[in-house]
Amino acid sequence: MEELTGIVALFFRDDMFYPAQFHGKKPPELEAADHAVLNPGTRRVETVDGVVLWQETKQ
């Protein structure tokens, strides 16, 4: 199994949040955007320190 070397990020949804560790092969902002697209309903992704990496945009 491939070792994960990226940061742990928090994925926020309407009624919950969950942590996920990134692979670390891309900058965290790009990896957050990739994950958010694959997880509809994600409202924002933050670092454990509260830095917003990705946020849903209103259309």
Image: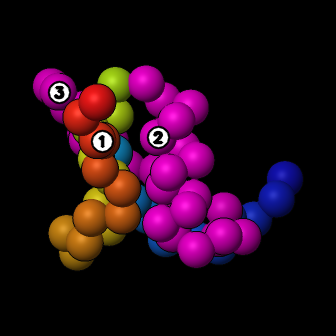
The residue located at (24%, 34%) in the rendering is 58
Residues packed near mark 1 inside 10 Å, few (<14), some (14 to 19) or many (20 plus): few
The amino acid on which the numbered mark 3 sits, given as a three-letter code, is Asp
Of pointers 2 and 3, the one earlier in the residue sequence? 3
Residue 13 percent across, percent down from the top left:
25, 32
Picture residue at 48% right of the left edge, 29% below the top: 39
Looking at the rendering, the stretch of residues picked out in magenta corresponds to: 12-40
* Number of marks in the rendered image: 3
Q: Of the residues shown, which amino acid type is indicated by label 1?
A: Glu
Residue at the extreme right? 1
Of callouts 1 and 3, the N-terminal one: 3
Q: Using the image, determine if residue 35 lies above or below residue 5.
A: above
User: Relative to residue 33, is residue 52 drawn left or right?
Assistant: left
Q: Does the magenta stretch include residue 31?
A: yes
| Residue bearing the label numbered 2 | 36
Tell me if label 1 and label 2 are in contact, CB under 8 Å. Answer: yes
